[in-house]
Amino acid sequence: MDEPSVTEPGTEGAGDSVIATRALTKRYRGGQLAVDGLDLTVPAGSVFGFLGPNGSGKTTTIRMLMGLIEPTSGTARVLGRPMPRSTRTVLPHVGALIEGPALYGFLSGRDNLLRYDAADPTADPRTRRARVASALERVGLGAAAGKKAKAYSLGMKQRLGLAAALLQPRKLLVLDEPTNGLDPQGMREIRSLIRELASDGTTVFLSSHLLDEIEQVCTHAAVMTRGRLITQGAVADLAAGTRGRLVVTTPDAGDAARVLKEHGAADVVVGDDRVTADPPDGDPADLNAALVSAGVRVRGFGIERASLEDAFVALTGEGFDVAG
């Protein structure tokens, strides 16, 4: 049966979704449920963070979106086309870095990219070397282009994989843990590059287990845990319904902690000159007054803005590996 006529990849309007799944499910042999009924919507033009602990189902989802594995049930559409049926139509418009790049260790970084590009039937061989050089410069590998890939560090290999995804203009860029192995400076550079790509109109789908990474670079996000979607939406909105931590700055941290506990504060953490806690219900001003009445010298008192970490803990009741 012929594929139904739908929008050509890359021609969606700004209000359309670039990725849309409905009840997407993957159950492996032996009964392991890796992805459970996923309803995901990725707006065009967004930097979309796909967030969850390692083992939460993120990579399995990405592999289904890219047509690498078949779902057990449910549907996935990428650039308006059903996957995996439309793999040949969709993938030329998608750049992807999934589970680290596959490299020829005996070839230089430059020659690896030349091989990648030569395997792309849509790539113009006349501009190949110029495009490879440009991609290497964009990810900060221009000076290491002639070095053999087997001598690359993990972070350099990640950069080279990202360069491969950028050889052609893409409507969608799918990155699975793109800052894995990078030092802090390298992470900042990749985040800057992602913002640059988004400003040029590329939708970026970024999988990560690093909450701060998602919070710094993404416009939208979804949170996965144990194969299920917990929440999704604009990053600015995800933590809006979550109450932030109470922070009291004082030289009398021990006394402050005692007073806070007496007034119903939970998860009280004492530092050298500050105490943090989950605030109790009620007017914070009354709590501040109780501290002062108890002789605590309060130098600072306030509720911090809730973070994605706070939202995740509130939604799931479990911690999160924020440091990687």
Image (cartoon, rainbow, N blue to C red):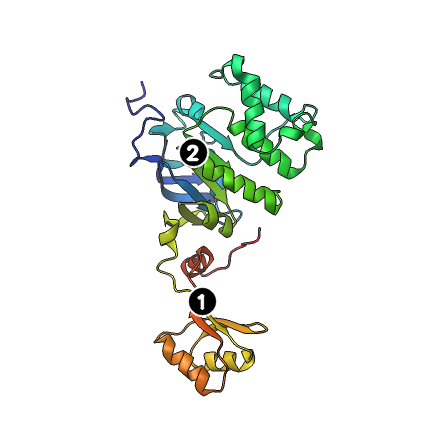
For marks 2 and 1, give the CA distance: 37 Å
Relative to 61, residue 143 above or below? above
Of residues 160 and 185, the one nearer the viewer is: 185
Q: Position of residue 235 (x, y in %)?
A: 39, 50
Question: Is disc 1 surrounded by few (<14), some (14 to 19) or many (20+) residues within 10 Å?
Answer: many
Question: Is disc 2 surrounded by few (<14), some (14 to 19) or many (20+) residues within 10 Å?
Answer: many
Left or right placement of residue 219 versus residue 144 in this view: left
Dividing the picture into quadrants, the one containing residue 204 is top left
Question: Which amino acid, by three-letter code, is at mark 2?
Answer: Leu
Q: What number of labels is visible?
A: 2
At x 52% / y 77%, what residue is drawn? 250
Q: Position of residue 66 (x, y in %)?
A: 45, 31
Q: Identify the mark at residue 245; answer none if there is no mark.
A: 1
Left or right placement of residue 89 versus residue 111 in this view: left
Is residue 66 visible to us here? yes
Q: Which residue is mark 2?
A: 65
